Amino acid sequence: MRAASDIEVRAPWGGMHDGQACDPAIETPRDLAALKPGVAVSMAQRLAMEDMASRLMAVEMQDGSVAIFAAPGYVRSDHADALERRLLECGYRLSHPVRYAVASPLLLSLARGQHALSGQKPAGVRELEESGTALGDVFQDVLDWAVAHHASDIHFNVSLRQAHSQVRFTIGGRYVQPERFRSLSSRMVLDILSVAWMDVRGGNGAVFDPGSEQQGSLTRMCGDRPFMLRWSSLAAEQGPSVCLRLLDRSEAGGKISLESLGYFPEQAARIGQAVGVQGGAVVVSGTVGAGKSTTLASMLGLVPAHRKVVTIEDPVERLLPGVIQNSIARDLHGDSHEAYTAKLRSLKRAALDDVCLGEIRDRETGLVFSDSVSSGVGVYTTVHAPSAAGIVDRLCSSFIGIPRDLLMSPGILKLLVHQALLPVVCDGCAIGLQELCVLPGGQGAAWRQWSGRMERMLQQDCRHVRWRDPRGCEACRRRELPELNGYVGRTVAAEILAPGDDASRDEGDCRVLFPARHRALPGARPDKHSALGAAVRKMLDGQVDPRDVQERFSAFLMPASPRWPGDCI
């Protein structure tokens, strides 16, 4: 934010207003503090407009002029027009520019007296008992921002011992905190969560309880797209921590090809062949946030139309055309969940060909898996496992309890897939080794040594390897998230196993079903068929930064790497 005379004129939530230039935006406390002339006092009480202050307020500037602070949807509203006319009729001198689009969280903080104007406690604003509508507007602003920046999760981390609490986002697999949401008071965040919980369905508890774990889901519109927010809260020591997973419920959300996710053509073809065969299980593994559900939705799109597909999910994440989807909400504390038992009984009479179980994570879901796959139904599901070869051990673990003998039976496990997500470097600004070595920080020699060790280990020409430029470019630079400069989305690095793939079996022990070569040791030359091999292939092609491959797979067993050049900028 700069002085009013040279302020950046734009509308972050829209374009032109009635053919006029966009109003200047105040998005963060830093923008407010940098405003010249500064803000002296709110006029909400003087004008008897306290009830509107969370959406629209007049403020007196330090030079005696008067400006209008408004939430984005109110800047060019009839209410703002009427307030401007009233100010002129009362003889006030209007500032230039007169109207500012203030981010809803910041405006509500000002209205509640929880943020100082020009470093002083606002004298004209009384503490408001905010309506649910105003708090709901702030919650919607957080959601709109998350969707606009392609966040997968929103995190409200309340600190009851501190004045302000954190609102963070998971974007591109990274846990970030934009400047605009740093000023929210702890009291306000609690109020926002309490209001949002009123719309939760399938939740445990009539009201938001900061002292207990709660889960549920709610639906909100963002633009013309419906989103489901999957609510999960932890009663942490410092205060409640609420994670909201954003799930696009529009029809377009389920239509995505495996190739567009990052699967190589030969991998997509192999998955397509397996899906085309009726019966058996396809299991997708990965860590939390690895995109397993998206891959599963893509696979279901390959099932022939003449087969009936039913899903059991907790909850439904993506709407899939032609698929019969069922949401099952299970509470956190019940030892036995009748809903799952009832669905299992119904499945046997549903005359289905394939069933999708959103995730195998406990004995109940393991029971549904075992019953379905052993009866000849095709099963598609996900599980948290460190590798494709580790899926069997995970399914047989005490947490899930599927008998190993069942999994070893012919025709039960059809395909095992493991995937990881890696950030993609921007084509417009990704740099080579020589450019990397001259970035600020004086670590060129260390990076050359790093690259040389990598090339010798891989026994590959690394001349086409490209590195992320933390300065970014017009195509990838993010004003509010500089830590993501140089990246443009993520891509899958995957491995695929089927029973008998180069299997080194011990004839005396039929438990060895999958090849030992997929259990690669860190630092060894990666097998081209492993997930690490896929990541290295994309790295050598210039798609991903070697440092991201190292961070995800511990691939190169190098001594302590020099700091990222981005740390010095």
Image (cartoon, rainbow, N blue to C red):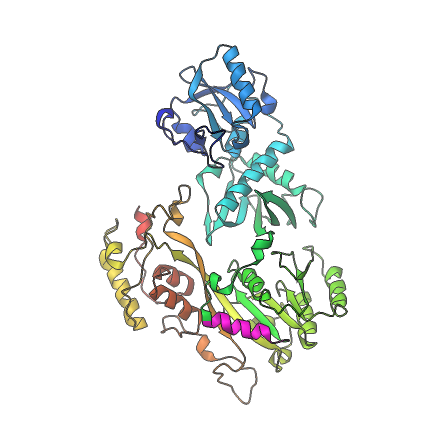
Q: Residue furthest bottom?
A: 507
- Magenta span contains residue 267: yes
The image quarter in which residue 535 lies:
bottom left
The image quarter in which residue 209 lies:
top right
Tally the numbered discs: 0
Q: Is residue 124 visible?
A: no
Question: Residue 136's spot in the image, x, y percent?
Answer: 61, 36
Question: Residue 325's spot in the image, x, y percent?
Answer: 67, 60
Residue under the image location 64 percent in, 39 percent down: 194
Compared across the picture, whether 115 is left or right of 400 comes to left
Residue under the image location 50 percent in, 44 percent down: 148
| Depicted 246 relative to depicted 43: above or below | below
Q: Is residue 29 visible?
A: yes
Viewer-proximal residue among 151 and 114? 151
Viewer-proximal residue among 109 and 22? 22
- Magenta span contains residue 24: no
Question: Residue 204's spot in the image, x, y percent?
Answer: 70, 49
Residue under the image location 26 percent in, 66 percent down: 452
Compared across the picture, whether 556 is left or right of 445 comes to right
Question: Residue 488's spot in the image, x, y percent?
Answer: 41, 53
The secondary structure making up most of the magenta span is helix
Which residues are drawn in magenta?
266-278
| Depicted 487 relative to depicted 142: above or below | below
| Depicted 413 relative to depicted 61: above or below | below
Image quadrant containing the N terminus: top left
